Image (cartoon, helix red, strand yellow):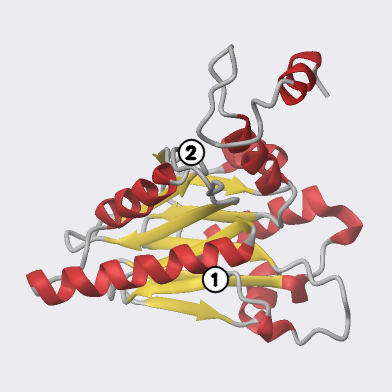
Amino acid sequence: MEQSTMSHQMMGYDRTSTMFSPDGRLLQVEYAKKTIRQGSTAVGIVCKDGVVLLTDKRIANKLIVSESVEKLFQVDDHIGATVSGFVSDGRILVEKARVRAQQHRVTYDEPIDVLEMVKSICDMKQWFTQVGGARPFGVSILFAGVDEDGTAKLFATEPSGIFFQYRATAVGEGEVEINDILTKEYKENINIEDGFRLALNAFKKVLGKNFDINRMGGAYIKISDKKFTKVDVNYIRKVAK
């Protein structure tokens, strides 16, 4: 651990998320980011015909029913999400996102834009970095969706409340290595099947002997119908060939 971080701990700058350290850092937010880097990896890729999400469930116990491990969520008909970090934190935020989407649909009689959804959740994330007696959300969420104009979008949110739009990205334990692969191999004209194949190949390279296709979970939203669709392991096996 860095000497400066240790001294800040001794001085109590990490006891609350509302206290800046002398060099302008919120240590609780930084700890939350480290939590995400220990979480199972999730990948999102924008394709010419939609957007895909692929996640590693990382099931450690063979007696666990794999279907009960949920890391892919439908937010609205046209928006999906996957999480890395504290999945329980992610579940709460996804529930908030679902309510926000339904409120928008009831109020305006139209589906919510992906960006508006992301801003709403990131506002909540940011709020928890400046409230006493609370901790930041220890989760990064990839939101993927297709807007009414037919534009496929992918956003990654951080514990601080900041977000970025990507063509392809990964969050979680293997994010650095997978993002390097995506940077080199991603092409904007790939289709959904090629997107899954690229994500799977990246997982294989990074996880090596620990790669298990049965731990993979995937979903996509096509531009043509704007419908969130989960895929089963048989589809993933077919794509992987």
Mark 1 residue type: Leu
Q: Position of residue 75 (x, y in %)?
A: 38, 71
Q: Earlier in the sequence, mark 1 or mark 2?
A: 1
Q: Residues within 10 Å of mark 2 (few under 14, many from 20)?
A: many
Q: Is residue 79 left or right of residue 67?
A: left
Quadrant of residue 231 within the rendered picture: bottom right
Mark 2 residue type: Ser
Indicate the secondary structure of the residue bearing disc 1: strand
Between 162 and 135, the one nearer to me in the picture: 135
- Residue at image x 77%, y 17%? 7
Indicate the secondary structure of the residue bearing disc 2: loop
- What label sits on residue 81 in the rendered view? none
Tell us which disc is closer to us: 1 or 2: 2
Do the residues bearing badges 1 and 2 touch, measured as CB atoms within 8 Å?
no
Between 224 and 110, the one nearer to me in the picture: 110
145 shown above or below 132: below
Per the model, the C-alpha gap separating discs 1 and 2 is 22 Å
5 shown above or below 48: above
Q: Position of residue 228 (x, y in %)?
A: 39, 75
- What label sits on residue 72 in the rendered view? 1
Quadrant of residue 37 within the rendered picture: top right
Q: Position of residue 80 (x, y in %)?
A: 42, 67
Q: Quadrant of the N terminus?
A: top right
229 shown above or below 161: below
- Residue at image x 77%, y 66%? 58
- Residue at image x 53%, y 47%? 133
Q: Which residue is mark 2?
A: 160
